[in-house]
Image (cartoon, helix red, strand yellow):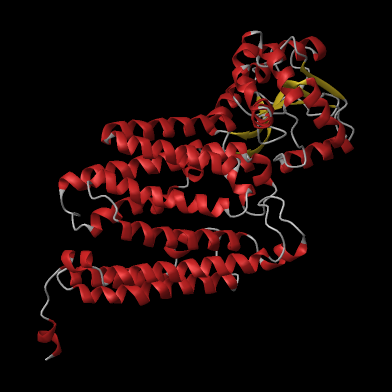
Amino acid sequence: MNSPVNPPDQLNHSVPLCVDLDGTLVRTDFLLETAIVAIRNHWPIIFQLPFWFLTGKARAKSKLAKFGTCNLETIPWNEEFINYLKKEHEKGRRIVLATASDRSIAESVALPLGIFEEVISSDGITNIKGEAKAKVLVDRYSEHGFDYAGNDNSDLPVWKRARTALIVNARSNVSKSVAKLVHVEHEFGRRRPVILGLIKGCRIYQWIKNILVFIPMVVAHRLFEKSALFPSLLTFAGFCAAASGIYLINDLMDLEADRLHPRKRYRPFASGELPLQYGVVGLFLITIAITIGLVVSRGILSIILLYITLSLVYSNFIKTKPLADVFCLAALYLLRVIAGGFASGSHASVWLLNFSGFLFLSLGFLKRYAEYPQSDFESTSKNVRRGYKNFDSLLIIIMGVSSSFLSSMVLGLYVNSAQAQYIYQTPFLLWGFVPLVLYWQCRMWLATIRGNMHDDPILYAAKDRISYLIVALLILIYIAASFNLNLGYFLN
């Protein structure tokens, strides 16, 4: 027998092409897709899953397929490969869907495409994967009597017994392994390294919000005290881990909604860039956050647990409730400030909490308004996803802008308070804060109403040069007010 790495004498269309489903025809895994849908629709199933898998993977797949029906219209298909299959079908080539997915799923996928003459799949008793799939195909088409298209290491036993290989959406190490076993007829794309998808899914750029934990320490003039700085840094790390873990978990639970969104459909899980099993990293990151909370203090642990719980409840319930969603967003921001106070031992004052509360409430309303342009509010009587009705946009603007001015009013009252007079050497310089903060908020609202705002105002500010200028001026005013400067010297 010729070496399997040698090309066959002729590549004709009389040899059937057997195609894998998960990761090959589609850029996802239907077992995990159905599990996610099932848990989202019937959450008590999560306690039954271990017992289902103990009775056999094929049986578990069959049960999940009944509880977790996937919307095939939103599934990320491998378009390049499907176009190739359609051309081969038009040439008269026999194409077979050979998958480890449950038969109900395999048939629902094969039927609308109209290119598969046969479906070979798991049936609730036998799990058709790896060696089991290779045996079925050899029994049906003989050794090296079929071509096979797959994507990962579990397909290596099948490729070994195929005539030629088609590699689809595979990692580079898989491609190298296949090339040693069999002649590679075609290769469609390469899967990007998992670490890149994880970094993108963790949304590290969102960590900028966690800088809020340092605010109480800065206000209390304890920035360079190790006893305050080190716990604050740990708390910052805890919130970063918690936030990234929550993003990964929420992206898993929001797969269908994200795939229908014009921008969110490019997120790693939604697009199929990152395999769904890496959602477990979210749980790992949350565990790290809780561990950090334990290390710092019981107070920080309680706040981090509250932050995680409130974030998950928000994502799965509160975000569809008008007004409650905005107040919840403001609370999530405020928890970072409160945690910073506990970590540094400089508990947030009533002044800071009131100022921050109104500021974050304004940003929450701004974020909500920015997510839905005016046309969206007017086009339907109700926004299905968020629960807002038409003409609510005007009320959102009123409440948001009012909160901006209230935060600036609180800031002005603080500047004239006895507490500010005691803490700062030159407190009257703090009056420079008031117009700068109010100007920044008004500018953000102007950008939003003009349609220039992204979904998240904090990220918009992070890319805005004027915002950086305002922050620089605030820092200069803070430094000047903190020391007893002889301004007369500069004026003469």
Give the vertical position of 378 relative to 147 (above or below).
Answer: below
Camera-nearest residue between 381 and 201: 381
Q: Position of residue 411 (x, y in %)?
A: 34, 68
Q: Position of residue 34 (x, y in %)?
A: 69, 28
Q: Position of residue 83 (x, y in %)?
A: 78, 42
Give the image quarter of residue 74: top right
As drawn, is 191 to the left or to the right of 434?
right
Name the quarter where the C terminus is drawn: bottom left
**Residue 96 visible in the snapshot:** no
Instruction: Please give the count of numbered marks on the rendered protein.
Output: 0
Camera-nearest residue between 409 and 396: 409
Camera-nearest residue between 122 and 6: 122
Name the quarter where the N terminus is drawn: top right
As drawn, is 277 to the left or to the right of 108?
left
**Residue 18 visible in the snapshot:** yes
Give the vertical position of 1 relative to 345 (above or below).
Answer: above
Give the image quarter of residue 269: top right
Question: Residue placed farthest to the front in the image?
Answer: 418
Residue appearing at x 69%, y 26% in the figure = 7
Q: Position of residue 144 (x, y in %)?
A: 74, 16
Residue appearing at x 80%, y 31% in the figure = 109
Residue appearing at x 59%, y 32% in the figure = 276
